[in-house]
Amino acid sequence: MGIYALTGAATGIGAALSRQLREAGNDTIVVDVKAEDADIVADLSTAAGRKSAVEGIQARAPEGLDGFVPLAGLGGHVTPPSLIARLNYFGAIACVEGVRDLVARRQGAVVLISSNSAPGLGVNEEYLGLLAAGEESAACELIDTLNSALAYAGSKLAIARWMRHHVTEYAKCGIRLNAVAPGVTRTPMTDAVYENPQVREAMLAYVASIPVERTAAPEEIANAIRFLLGPEASFVCGSVLFVDGGQDASQRPDQM
């Protein structure tokens, strides 16, 4: 059986994935800002928290990881927008790079979390460029002059771009990089979005456009991540798997 490290796995999709992996006989290392159900408590929006998380994973998996999934993230309703950039993008990438050697040691897989909304909510190319360049302070300063929706969409698009730009480099180390792009999923994060009166109506309209006419359960997204982590996906590398009830295809049928 394997050993996997997951961030943001105390609730939502991460909790479902951790449960599935453990039920299959695997060990999981859970990193979360919440102490409950976390093996390592760390705030990945900060440099100190990222360092603590990586060191904690290294201590618990000295022989390597079979897989790593950076699930910790914030939705587009959170303020300030820079907090979204710090956690969703810089926190995720710092942890992936920090555990790279551990995953390579066991020829494992990394699955990043993008979003089906990333291509559709509008982007700011200057912000995306600063994310890609690793310019955290400048990216955060810029996005705080814009808005949280752009911060979220940009962070998730940048995650997918980072994955595709690094897929060859990581593959040469024996690591498969992929990403999932979930649609609207019933989690505490999306519950908070529904409760925000400024975005509630837009959220309801977005959900109404899903072809299968429902939102996802956390387990359904976890199923896709688990597939990409496992041996059945041994030749899947550099892909973004949309798990969104057909929404991306219905809204952008000529793009792929």
Image (cartoon, grey):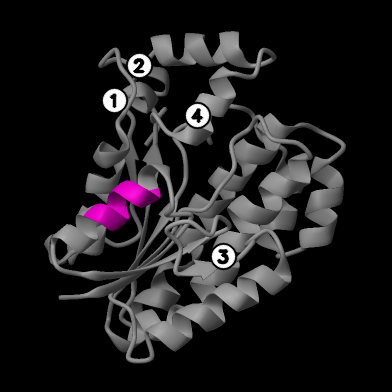
Looking at marks 1 and 4 on the same chain, the residue that comes earlier in the sequence is marked by 4
In the rendered structure, the answer to whether residue 236 lies left or right of residue 175 reads: left
Q: Which residues are magenta?
A: 14-19
> Considering the image in quadrants, where does the N terminus appear?
bottom left
- Residue identified by numbered label 4: 190
Work out how far the residue at label 2 is from the one at label 3, CA to CA, in angstroms: 30 Å
Element at badge 2? loop
- Residue identified by numbered label 1: 245
- Residue identified by numbered label 3: 93
Work out how far the residue at label 4 is from the one at label 2, CA to CA, in angstroms: 15 Å
Q: Quick one: 129 or 209, which is closer to the camera?
A: 209
Looking at marks 2 and 3 on the same chain, the residue that comes earlier in the sequence is marked by 3
Q: Are marks 3 and 4 in contact (CB under 8 Å)?
A: no
Element at badge 4? helix
Work out how far the residue at label 1 is from the one at label 4, CA to CA, in angstroms: 16 Å
Visible residue check, residue 128 = no
Of badges 4 and 2, nearer the viewer stands 4
In the rendered structure, the answer to whether residue 64 lies left or right of residue 54 reads: left
Q: Residues within 10 Å of mark 1 (few under 14, many from 20)?
A: some
Visible residue check, residue 237 = yes
Work out how far the residue at label 1 is from the one at label 3, CA to CA, in angstroms: 27 Å
Looking at marks 4 and 2 on the same chain, the residue that comes earlier in the sequence is marked by 4
Of badges 3 and 4, nearer the viewer stands 4
| Three-letter code, disc 4 | Thr
Q: Residues within 10 Å of mark 2 (few under 14, many from 20)?
A: many
For image coordinates 28% across by 47% down, the residue present is 222
